[in-house]
Image: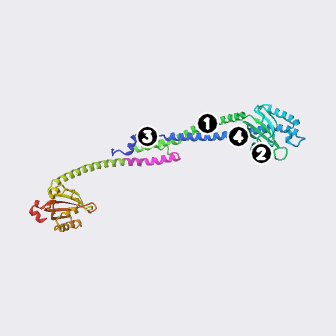
Amino acid sequence: MNINEPAWNKTENKPSKTRFSIRTKIIAAVIMVSFVTASLITTMQIRMICRNVLIQAEMQAEALTVPIQQKVDGLLSSQTDFRRLGQTQTKTQLQEVLANTLDWPGRQDITAAYIIDKYGKVLAQETKGTVPADVPTEILDTQLNGISKPRIVKIDGRYDTFVPYFQEGDRAAGYLVLGISAQSLWDQAEELAAGAIITFVIIALISVVVFGFWVSQHMVKPLERIAEGIVHGAKNGKTRLGRLAKSNDEIGRLANVTSQVLPELYRQQQQLKKTSTLLAAENNKLERTKRALMEMERYYRSAVEAATGVAYELDLATGKFEFLSRQVYETVGFAAEDLTSSDVWTKHIHEDDRAQAKEAMNGCLNGEQSCFSRTYRFVCKEGHNLQVVEMGGLIIDSAGRGTRISGIIIPAHMIPKSLLATA
């Protein structure tokens, strides 16, 4: 990655994943909400239409039964029992009244006309089809008992309108019934429902178009212009959002705030570019310094390995050797793996010299002196004693604490006597 190039400039060049735009999402949501709303309203309207058709049919049936009831009242003027309408002398006249009802001018949908008593027994009837049977008791009990207005009831696939006939009091003595074709009712409902559906679909489509256009003009396009202005402003420090800041809605306030922020964003971007350039230069310096240190360490290790004596570095926190040169094997016969810590090394110091050797090093460990020098006999692996001279110093970290000791161990016979005398 080029450190000189800001991250946001990188992302602009990357191909973005295919996503739906805000415009598409809003329009899709509007369409869904509109059609769901239209569907619910249409369903409710259809139910209302069907109910209105039934109410209209009931009202028409009630109006048609008015002249029938007047003629029935004339037949009962000298009678007190509604059931006597089924007797022979009265039934003939009643049949004629019902027959005239079937031939009502302009009403081809009336398929039956009959009269029942309050127990559901047919007293007289005229039909264009099958003769109606007595009305079942459960219909009388559940749907007709106690009604005071006309009611449509489905019986044997036909919709019959029952109009209560009150002879006296508030209890129906019987019912005047008109059978109206179910197909006629359905045709009316279907015609009205079709008109309602077409009307609401048109309303929904118009609403979708108008609302979608409004959202596009007043929401989507301003947001697109704001996004475009942010991109241009971040690149050249110029803002192009003044025309949007004139509005007082949320988008206008967003444009106004963005116009004020863009110059600072541009300034920070330019400053970041300069900082990135400086960091790149410092990074290059650090890389060169790192390579130089690694090369120096390699030279140091090689020089130590080639030098006479045993070089080491001891970690004071763990007491273990971080580094022990391979000359240790040539000098004392032990491999570096055999002498892993200062305690192991001390065990091989001759017991007569061990206390003196520890005391010489304690001053450096306690911080009383920065370096030390000690001479002692080391018991080699073959069992013979080798007099050695050890010199070392304390390594201090950035906090001023001693963390390691670096030193060298040289056989005494390899040191000039003049130097050995002062060691």
Cα separation, mark 4 vs mark 2, equals: 21 Å
Q: Secondary structure at mark 1?
A: helix
Amino acid type for the residue under numbered disc 2: Asn
Residue sitting nearer the eye, 306 or 388 = 388
Residue 69 visible within the image: yes
Identity, as a three-letter code, of the amino acid under mark 4: Arg
At mark 3, the secondary structure is loop
Is most of the magenta stretch helix, strand or loop?
helix
Nearest-to-viewer mark from 2 and 3: 2
> How far apart are the two marked residues, 1 and 3, measured between alpha carbons?
36 Å
Q: Residue at x 72, y 38 (%)?
A: 53
Nearest to N terminus: mark 4 or mark 1:
4
How many residues crowd mark 2 within 10 Å: few (<14), some (14–19), many (20+)? Answer: some
Question: Decide: marks 4, 1 in contact (CB < 8 A)?
Answer: no
SS category of the residue bearing label 4: helix
**Distance between the Cα atoms at labels 2 and 1?**
42 Å
Front of the two marks 4 and 1: 4
**Label 1: which residue?**
201
The Cα atoms of the two marked residues, 2 and 3, are separated by 70 Å
The residue beneath circle 3 is 17
The CA distance from mark 4 to mark 1 is 22 Å
The amino acid sitting under disc 1 is Val
Task: Residue 44 in the image: state x and y as whole percent.
Answer: 65, 41
> In the rendering, which numbered label is found on residue 51?
4
- Calculate the distance from the C-alpha at mark 3 to the C-alpha at mark 4: 53 Å
Give the residue number, with chain letter if any, for mark 2. Answer: 145
- Within 10 Å of the Cα at label 3, are there few (<14), some (14-19), or many (20+) other Cα atoms? few
Q: Quadrant of residue 230?
A: top left
416 drawn magenta? no
Point out the stretch of residues depicted in magenta: 246-269
Q: Position of residue 313 (x, y in %)?
A: 22, 58
Q: Image height check: is 309 above or below 22?
A: below
